[in-house]
Amino acid sequence: MRTQFALLLLTDGRPTMTHAEFAKLRHKSPRTIQNEIYAKRNPVPFWKDGGDYLCNVSDVASWLDGQRQDAISAMPHLATFSD
């Protein structure tokens, strides 16, 4: 839940995130994210609205939380840093 609130702060309270905002979060270029969307390799579902691709902030938060859990499972010593 904290992740979702943090992402809502990044998007000024909007429940959606653009592909450019998602790219910045992942330290990738917006074009790379577009290529992942086209190839259906992006970890978060996007849809096209006008000229931009959007995703739900809750989907991004769920994906980030899952990434964290995967890292903790792969490296148990990281569990000492969990909430």
Image (spheres, helix red, strand yellow):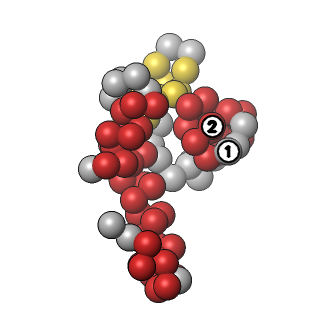
Q: CA distance from mark 2 to mark 1?
A: 5 Å
In the image, residue 62 above or below residue 20: below
At label 2, the amino acid type is Lys
The residue labelled by disc 1 is: 27
In the image, residue 25 above or below residue 47: below
Q: Residue 10, image x and y in percent? A: 46, 31
Residue shown at 39% from the left, 40% from the top: 6
Q: Which mark is residue 47?
A: none
Relative to 24, 17 lies left or right: left
Q: Residue 73, image x and y in percent? A: 45, 81
Q: Nearer the viewer, residue 36 or 11?
A: 11
Return the residue found at the far top.
50
Q: Residue 77, image x and y in percent? A: 49, 85
Return the residue found at the far left.
1
Q: Are marks 2 and 1 in contact (CB under 8 Å)?
A: yes
Residue shown at 63% from the left, 37% from the top: 24
Residue shown at 48% from the left, 64% from the top: 67
Q: Residue 71, image x and y in percent? A: 51, 73
In the image, residue 4 above or below residue 75: above
Q: Nearer the viewer, residue 83 or 30?
A: 83
Q: Secondary structure at mark 1?
A: loop
Residue 38 shows in this picture: no
Looking at the rendered image, the quarter that the C terminus falls into is: bottom left
The residue labelled by disc 2 is: 24
Relative to 30, 7 lies left or right: left
Q: Within 10 angstroms of label 1, few (less than 14), some, or many (20 or more) residues?
A: few
Q: Secondary structure at mark 2?
A: helix
At label 1, the amino acid type is His
Q: Within 10 angstroms of label 2, few (less than 14), some, or many (20 or more) residues?
A: few
Q: How many marks?
A: 2
Q: Quadrant of residue 60?
A: top left
Q: Nearer the viewer, residue 31 or 1?
A: 1
